[in-house]
Image (cartoon, rainbow, N blue to C red):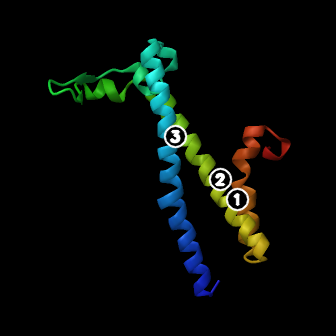
Amino acid sequence: MDDPALWHRLQFAFTVTYHYLFPQLTKGLAWFLVFWKWRALRTRDAGKHTDAFMQHTVGPVIAANGTLAIDDLSAYLLNPWVAVQFAHNQAAALVTGTFVVTAVGAFYVLREAHRDQARLYLKHGAVPSRIRRGTPEAN
């Protein structure tokens, strides 16, 4: 891993991933959200709305200039939906971290380097997926 070209390639891969692919994905998904929101408003079917957090609105008000403002911060922060959204966010972060740790472990195995670290990363990185599946290895 002393090769400067490798580090340049890794930096390029990181830059491409976070500065090109993710924004493109976000912009592409935005069209779906706009369509689904338009359809929900057109049909007046609240079940088709995509903004689940705002389905349980407490605390915000529409200001005189038409912007959304927080009128009651404690009501907003203690919204019952917050716990569900927070749990969802944390689970997604755990899954993302799991993939990264496992991927680094797999990379080390393929390179036949850092064997102890590779074993550790693969063992612990895969734990959440084993817990999710409920396999005997998780116990």
Between the C-alphas of marks 1 and 3, the distance is: 27 Å
Q: Residues within 10 Å of mark 3 (few under 14, many from 20)?
A: few
Which residue, given by chain and number where applicable, does mark 2 sit on?
98
Q: Position of residue 106 (x, y in %)?
A: 75, 65
- Left or right, 72 with reference to 136: left
Q: Nearer the viewer, residue 122 or 29?
A: 29
Q: Nearer the viewer, residue 67 or 136?
A: 67
Q: Are marks 2 and 1 in contact (CB under 8 Å)?
A: yes
- Quadrant containing the C terminus in the rendered view: top right
Name the amino acid, label 2: Thr
Identify the residue at image location x=69%, y=61%: 103
Q: Nearer the viewer, residue 5 or 54?
A: 5
Identify the residue at image location x=57%, y=68%: 13
Q: Position of residue 56 (x, y in %)?
A: 41, 20
SS at badge 2:
helix
Name the amino acid, label 1: Thr
Q: Position of residue 108 (x, y in %)?
A: 73, 71
Which residue, given by chain and number where applicable, does mark 1 sit on?
102
